[in-house]
Image (cartoon, helix red, strand yellow):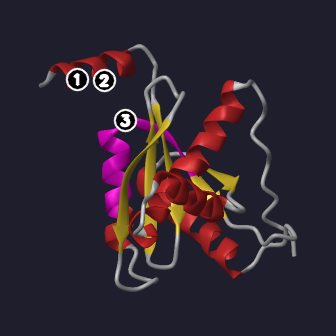
Amino acid sequence: MTESDNRQQSLADRGYRRVLGLDYGSKTVGVAVSDPLRLTAQGVEIIRRKSENKLRQTLARISELASDYQAEAIVLGFPRNMNATIGERARAAIEFKAMVERRTQLPVILWDERLTTVAADQVMDETGVRDHKKYVDEIAAMLILQGYLDRTNAGLPVPEVNIDEE
């Protein structure tokens, strides 16, 4: 066990647990993780699959990451339409939420992700990243998770997502 592993375990023993952030897409899932103090979000990886409905390996990888990082919750981007209605992608996210909860046994919090992909593209433009497709989902997951962390660190309640609309 490395010094870093020992430090992580020590923080977990004192009740500091991480949160995973997910940006769920039709063929990818961007993954981010908080630091143990829940101040910042860091990108982890992009899970890729060949088909939208092939989720077994994706769910297994998310479960593995949740265990590896000792996560106590998962924040999942909820892609509402710009007019706040729930469309096809949002319904798919609701179904994915249930699958992730079953697989990981962790609470999954839906987080409004409108414009995170646009923001991720802007970040990459500003930092000179040319291959947006390679990183956009991971950066979007970081932005989703950072939004959640900023709100909870400010002592503000997490907005309830009404999934019964429409």
Q: Secondary structure at mark 2?
A: helix
- Specify whether 94 is left or right of 38: right
Of residues 47 and 9, the one nearer the viewer is: 47
Q: Amino acid at mark 3?
A: Gln
Which is closer to the viewer, label 3 or label 2?
2
Q: CA distance from mark 3 to mark 2?
A: 9 Å
Q: Which residues are magenta?
A: 60-75
Q: Amino acid at mark 1?
A: Ser
Magenta-drawn stretch contains 146:
no
Which is closer to the viewer, label 3 or label 1?
1
* x and y, in percent, of residue 25 in the image: 52, 72
The residue pinned by badge 1 equals: 4
Of residues 43 and 61, the one nearer the viewer is: 43
- Specify whether 6 is left or right of 78: left
Which residue is at a point 43% across and 38% down the rendered structure image? 71
Q: Kindly check if marks 2 and 1 are in contact, taking CB atoms under 8 A apart as contact.
A: yes
Which circle's residue, 3 or 2, is located before the other in the chain?
Answer: 2
The residue pinned by badge 3 equals: 70
Q: Secondary structure at mark 3?
A: loop
Question: 79 above or below 10?
Answer: below
- Specify whether 69 is left or right of 83: left
Q: Quadrant of the C terminus?
A: bottom right
Q: Amino acid at mark 2?
A: Gln
